[in-house]
Structure formats: C-alpha cells, structure tokens
Image (cartoon, grey):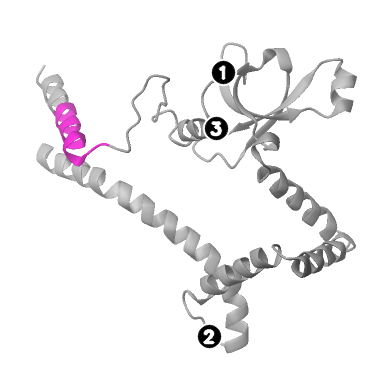
C-alpha cells in the first residue's frame, strides 16, 4: 500500500506541471475560438474547430495595423464617437477603454506604480497590494486624510481583489518588483523572491525526486516511531 501511494504521488508530481500548462492553453484556445466561432457557425452552418481562433487573431492584427496610420485612426475615432452616443453601451465601453489605456501606459504613467504592504484585514496582519495612485479628491477632503488607492489582489487569481483607500502614511513601500509580487501572489507564497535569492528557472526532476524521497523517508521514520 505504501509503494502504491508512493507511485501515485510521484505520478502526480510528474504530470501536474504539464497538465496545468495544457489546461491553461486549452482555456485560452477555447476562449478565442468562441469569440468568432459562433458567427462562423451561423454563416456556414457548421463548426470548424480552430477557425474562430484564426479569425480572432486576424481581426486583432488588422485593428493593430489600422491604428498605425492616419486613415485607420480616423475610422477608430469615428467608431469611438458612435459607441459614446449609444445609451448604456457608452458607459461600459468608456470604462473598459479607460482601464485598458491605464494598464498600457508608459512606465512613467503605468497603472500599477509600486508593490506595497498594508495592514489588512486587521492590525497585525499584512497584505500585499499595488499602489495605483492618489484617491479621489472628494474622498480625501471629506475624510480630511491624504488617501491613496491600493489594489489588493486575491491568491491564486490576481485578476480579482479589493480596492482599498489607505492613508498614505500607513502604506509601506517594498523593493520587490511588480513581477515578483505577482509570482508571490499566484503561488500563494510558495515562490519567494527573496532579496538575496539566486534566481533559477526551475529545478531538475532529479532534485524534485530526491526531495520527494526524503519526505517519504521522514514519514516512514515517523510511522515506525
């Protein structure tokens, strides 16, 4: 039974990285394929796997090409004006566009300015967050406090989280880069960037198996005792 458990756990150790990677790629492929796949299905009456993905990529490339010349920018500005004058649609379109523009700004005006530490959800417990800028002037004025916006992402999915308005003096700036912070959050603290840590692309399978064998040996010794 112990040997069976060892083989099973070893198999999981070997398969999990590849399975997680394939699952992520499959989700991306399926999402892009669905974007245009349904329209193609309505036109030709049948579903062709992968065709929606190809059409989506082509449309994105064409949109990118149009923004690089004067004529294309003219039509894109015209499209913006049309979207801004459609009730209900205008608020969603404008908000999404502002978010995209904020994220893709240059380094001097980027949305996530710095990785910070704040006491949240209570005193004595700290959370990682991203400083996104000063709070709305009205909020700071009514609270009579210099507040800043801090986005606290959830783990392991950093695309969701909380927007907190924190007094500037209570925000602790960190030397970690934004990329290191993302890795720490996604890995739930397993991948620790560490200031003096040697950067490695990954461990070899021999090292992983040796570590697994040591854990197995420790468990056997504990069971014996």
Question: Measured along the vertical axis of the image, is residue 49 above or below residue 98?
Answer: below
Mark seen at residue 66: none
Q: Tell which of 215 and 71 is nearer to you.
A: 71
The kind of secondary structure element at disc 3 is helix
The residue that mark 3 highlights is 178
Point 43% across, 28% down: residue: 189
Q: Nearer the viewer, mark 1 or mark 3?
A: 3
Prevailing secondary structure class for the magenta stretch in the rendered image: helix
Verify CB contact (< 8 Å) between mark 1 and mark 2.
no
Quarter of the figure that contains the N terminus: top left
Mark seen at residue 126: 1
| Residue 177 screen position, x and y as percent | 52, 29
Question: Measured along the vertical axis of the image, is residue 98 above or below residue 122?
Answer: below
Question: Measured along the vertical axis of the image, is residue 127 above or below residue 41?
Answer: above
Residue 80 left/right relative to 207: right
Q: Residues within 10 Å of mark 1 (few under 14, many from 20)?
A: few
Residue 119 left/right relative to 51: right
Asked if the magenta segment contains residue 11, the reply would be no
* Segment tinted magenta in the rendering: 203-216
Point 78% across, 49% down: residue: 95
| Residue 48 screen position, x and y as percent | 48, 80
| Residue 56 screen position, x and y as percent | 58, 69
């Amino acid at each position: 039974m112990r040997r069976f458990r060892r083989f099973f756990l070893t198999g999981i150790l070997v398969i999990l990285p590849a399975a997680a990677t394939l699952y992520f790629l499959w989700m991306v492929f399926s999402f892009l394929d669905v974007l245009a796949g349904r329209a193609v299905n309505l036109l030709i009456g049948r579903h062709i796997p992968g065709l929606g993905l190809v059409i989506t990529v082509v449309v994105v490339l064409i949109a990118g090409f149009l923004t690089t010349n004067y004529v294309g920018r003219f039509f894109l500005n015209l499209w913006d004006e049309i979207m801004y004058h459609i009730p209900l649609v205008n608020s969603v379109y404008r908000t999404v566009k502002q978010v995209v523009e904020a994220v893709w700004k240059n380094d001097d005006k980027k949305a996530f300015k710095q990785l910070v530490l704040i006491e949240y959800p209570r005193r004595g417990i700290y959370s990682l967050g991203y400083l996104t800028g000063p709070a709305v002037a009205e909020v700071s004025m009514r609270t009579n406090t210099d507040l800043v916006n801090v986005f606290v992402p959830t783990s392991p999915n950093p695309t969701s989280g909380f927007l907190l308005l924190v007094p500037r003096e209570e925000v602790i700036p960190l030397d970690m880069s934004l990329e290191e912070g993302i890795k720490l959050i996604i890995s739930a603290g397993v991948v620790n960037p560490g200031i003096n840590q040697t950067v490695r692309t990954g461990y070899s399978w021999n090292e992983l198996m040796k570590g697994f064998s040591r854990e197995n040996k420790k468990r056997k010794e504990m069971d014996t005792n």
